[in-house]
Image (spheres, helix red, strand yellow):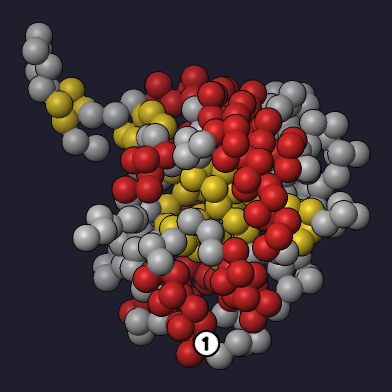
Amino acid sequence: MTSQTSATGPAVPAPHQIMLAVAPNGGRHTRQDHPNLPLTPAALAAAAAECLEAGANLLHVHVRDHQGRHTLDAAAYHKAFTAIRHEVGDGLVLQTTTEAIGQYTAPQQMEAVRALRPGAVSLAVAELFSGAASEHEVATFLAELALDQVLVQYILYSADDQRHLQALVQREIVPLPFWTLYVLGRYGQPRLSTPQDLLAFPPFSGPVTAPWAVCAFGPGELRCALAAVAFGGHVRIGFENNFQTPNGQTATSNAAQVRQLVAALGTLGAVPMSAAQLRATWQQPQG
């Protein structure tokens, strides 16, 4: 965090500008889990507008097929992204997922991204480098994303995933720049996420430097997010990982969770950056 000189006193720290991402639905939940879970393009667009107003700058989007099932279909994403952009313009970075959920292989995940050509994508290291595709195939795919200036965020479920990613960077399989997302907790696990879980994911050191963010399962989501910000990280919240407020009550909406987080960020001297500022962290000027 840098410092700014005050006209009336000593220098004060500049705000820590953060990526505040929202994952509004995920690929597993249904409206039986929460009545306000946004699943259709129209519902995603409405949720996006609310989250933008609340302070978010990135939307991590899952889409569903006509039966409500998780899909990576490019046409379904085009419909959802068109509806969202109609409501928010370029006010949010739109990030597609490649999550397999037991349905997609690494080659299928890469083909889905190539068909969509998104501005931002999340890639799970454990899925992409599962052996279903050769390292050469994956490296070629990642080079294409770098050439297109796609914001790549690698999903890390464990310290082993992080070490694997570091090794891939050192071997020049994975190009810079990228972001990472540390996942605290898992689907279906009874143990709730706590800020202490973050200790398994120390920020990159040595030859690898990458901005990092955290998402967390359960009502400890807010505390985990604030712990991440306190240590210089960024955050992702939303119904994909958590439906509850810190006191265990059911949250009313994704936007309500964003507002609660933004209100708490002030105590840490942090503010969400704009979507334009977020894009500038990885995009290079053309010309």
Q: Secondary structure at mark 1?
A: helix
Specify few, some or many for label 1: CA neighbours under 10 Å numbering under 14, 14-19, or 20 or more: some
Quadrant of res 22: top right
The vertical placement of 21 against 102, above or below, is above
Quadrant of res 258: top right
| Left or right: 199 in relation to 215 | left
Write down the residue under mark 1: 137
| Left or right: 266 in relation to 106 | left
- Quarter occupied by the N terminus: top left
What residue do we see at 47% from left, 35% from top? 91
- Quarter occupied by the C terminus: bottom left
The vertical placement of 12 against 117, above or below, is above
What residue do we see at 27% from left, 68% from top? 206
| Left or right: 154 in relation to 43 | left
Residue 25 placed where, x, y %?
Answer: 72, 44
Residue 285 shows in the view: yes
What residue do we see at 38% from left, 44% from top? 278
Q: How many marks?
A: 1
Q: Amino acid at mark 1?
A: Glu
Residue 102 placed where, x, y %?
Answer: 78, 70
Residue 213 placed where, x, y %?
Answer: 47, 49
Residue 240 shows in the view: no
What residue do we see at 32% from left, 50% from top? 281
Residue 16 placed where, x, y %?
Answer: 32, 34
Quadrant of res 224: top right
Q: Closer to the camera, 285 or 182?
A: 285
Q: Closer to the camera, 156 or 140?
A: 140
The vertical placement of 105 against 244, above or below, is below
Q: Closer to the camera, 160 or 242?
A: 242
